[in-house]
Amino acid sequence: MTEQPPRRGWTVFTEEIPVEVMLDMPPDLAKKVVHFLTALALEVGGAIDTDREPPGDPMDDLGVRYSLQVEGEPVLFEYAVIREIREVRVAVLVWFH
């Protein structure tokens, strides 16, 4: 029996338009959003790896798209779970200011 290499952790990838929104934010808020998204990758990965539902509101029946608000901030985003490459992809980010 061959030994399987250890699985790598989960990453977060933010598409271009959400990044532009974050660049328009005050630096403290942008930093908070980046930390939130980084922690989200760990939380989503842990949920998927243990067959639990990832955080947020499901947006489809396939378990791929979710929406979530950054706690205590006027920031909403949508993300997709890309299981094959262990990635959380942020496709939409809305900042209400």
Image (tube, rainbow, N blue to C red):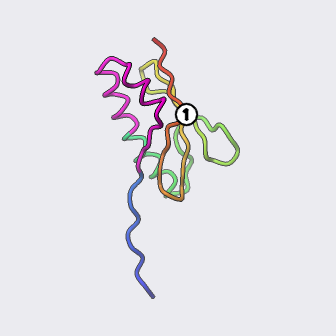
Residue at 34% x, 25% y is: 30
Q: Where is residue 49 in the image (x, y as percent from the top left)?
A: 49, 58
Q: Identify which residue, 55 or 60, lies in the foreground.
A: 60
The region drawn magenta spans 11-37
Q: Mark 1 points at which residue?
A: 78
Judged from this view, the residue extending furthest toward the top is: 97
Q: Quadrant of residue 67?
A: top right
Instruction: Bin the neighbour count of mark 1 within 10 Å (Cα to Cα): few under 14, some 14-19, many 20 and up.
Output: many
- Local secondary structure at mark 1: strand
Residue at 52% x, 40% y is: 55
Quarter that holds the C terminus: top left
Q: Does the magenta stretch include residue 32?
A: yes
Q: Identify which residue, 85 or 48, lies in the foreground.
A: 85
Q: Which amino acid does label 1 sit on?
A: Glu
**Taking 48 as reference, is 59 left or right?**
right
Residue at 60% x, 35% y is: 57
Q: Position of residue 23 (x, y in %)?
A: 36, 24
Q: Position of residue 11 (x, y in %)?
A: 41, 49
Q: Position of residue 70 (x, y in %)?
A: 44, 27
Magenta-drawn stretch, dominant element (helix, strand or loop): helix
Quarter that holds the N terminus: bottom left
Q: Does the magenta stretch include residue 48?
A: no
Residue at 41% x, 65% y is: 7
Judged from this view, the residue extending furthest toward the right is: 61
Give the vertical position of 71 relative to 58 (above or below).
Answer: above
Q: In which quarter of the image is residue 43?
A: top left
Give the vertical position of 33 relative to 51 (above or below).
Answer: above
Q: Quadrant of residue 25?
A: top left
